Image (tube, rainbow, N blue to C red):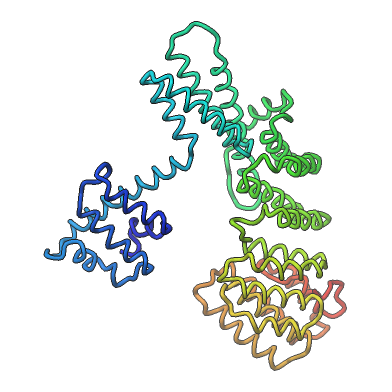
Amino acid sequence: MQNSKLLLLLKTFNAGELRAFRDFVASPFFNKNQELVTLYEYLKKQAAKDFPAAKLERTAVFAAVYPEEKYDEKRLNYALSLLLKLAERFVGIQQLENSAMLSDSQLLTVYTERHLDKNYDYIFQQTTERLAAYPFRNEAYYFQKYLLADAADAHFSAKNERRFDPALQQAADHLDRFYLCKKLKYLCNMLDRQKFIAANYQLHGLEAVKSYLSAKDWSHDPAIWVYWQLLQSLLEKEPAAHFKVFRQLLQTHLPVFSPAEARELYGFAINFYIQQIRIGEKHYAPDLMAIYREGIDNQVLLENGQLSPWTFKNVVKLGLGLRQYDWVEQIVTELSAKLDADKRADAYHFNLAELHYHRRNLDQALFYLNQVEFSDVSYHLGAKLMLLKIYFETGATEAFLSLVSTFRVFLQRNKQVPKEVKMPYLNFVNLLYEIFRSDETKTAVLKEKIEQTPMLTGRNWLLGQLPESEFTKL
């Protein structure tokens, strides 16, 4: 039962939700089936024990709900299905209540239909004040403005008065702004993703949106203006000018956006710089580091106070590449505490090892590598790769050959690591071993082989190990 839809949903409930759902199931308004109350009480007890498998065997659950009866698979399935429907209704109602504007717009519709003007006026005033205090001026704001204006227009229409009322125009205008915000976001996401994955999105409505937006000044609507500049930078062959405006607008109008949307916009900027660097525009590397630093300093790149391990890793790698070693040390020390607890220690030790490796403090690098416990396969692979480099560079032949052998076997036999992840490391091990065994007469052949191998990590480092190489050792 562990993988049933009901259990998967209940496992996402926090303590407050588990208690509230108990009241929901026990409420005669929502449920009059006492068996479901008993069933949920049993499951709630197991939630407190982290849902032990033995207690969730179907026969055990049935015995707890129907202690005097013979096991009946159909009856249990029916009860579980009914409880799942109640749980889905519970989270749906919760979601509606969490969105006060949606529930208020429905209430305004009810009061209009029942001709309760006094009730309507009170809720309308309350909703207007709450919306004025809404901190952001993004698509969610425009959608809420549209809902309120639409409710006002419906209320006016119900009176059958033949006079002008601004609500109709307001509803149309706010709907346009909401649509533009949403459409621009979809278009930007499709264009951005196509640069990194094989996807053939159909950009329906693109030309109409471009024509409409080009016809007037949108600087008074920052949410639209920011995405409009971003869209143009994603469409242009020479995107620098529009992207520069986008970056300036994002810095100026950051408070317009919710934290989640601000993080997404920073993601667009990061992806832009990464793409430019990939096509050879290496001068964008400092700009990429600048936006990482900016996003960390203003906490936009943190979600619920935590930093993504991938963002952490990318920042460290980029900082090392730019030789900003002091800042990298500060980042590793300060921000590792903001990583998920399960990966925090390994991230801290591994990245300090990388920092000391780049500073050529190889003894210190080895010390920190020995602290890595491999909570994630990426740390395992990265640590072995760094050890190979250190052993090769320091002439620790016995340790080098031993690790070549064991690491190669690990990569060949491990079925849990995908081929596309393993192959760049396996190719690195094989090529480094060839370099170890070769002499200067094979340099040209090995250089070509390294350059032509498609799936390969540490390509420049390997080239740097060839005699008289023009590449750096790092």
Q: Which is nearer the eye, 290 or 126?
A: 126
Q: Position of residue 472 (x, y in %)?
A: 84, 73
Horizontal placement of 417 versus 398: left or right? left
Q: Is residue 358 above or below residue 84?
A: below
Locate residue 347: give its quadrant. Answer: bottom right
* Count of numbered tags: 0
Q: Position of residue 413 (x, y in %)?
A: 52, 79
Extreme residue in the top direction: 162
Q: Residue at x 29, y 50 (%)?
A: 25
Q: Which is nearer the eye, 181 or 34?
A: 34
Q: Which is nearer the eye, 194 or 371?
A: 371
Q: Is residue 353 above or below residue 397?
A: above
- Can residue 237 be spotted in the picture? no
Q: Which is nearer the eye, 223 or 164?
A: 164
Q: Position of residue 17 (x, y in %)?
A: 40, 54
Q: Is residue 1 above or below residue 288?
A: below
Q: Residue at x 44, y 26 (%)?
A: 108
Locate residue 47: give its quadrant. Answer: bottom left
Q: Residue at x 59, y 69 (%)?
A: 421
Q: Quadrant of the C terminus?
A: bottom right
Q: Is residue 214 above or below residue 411?
A: above
Horizontal placement of 396 versus 260: left or right? right
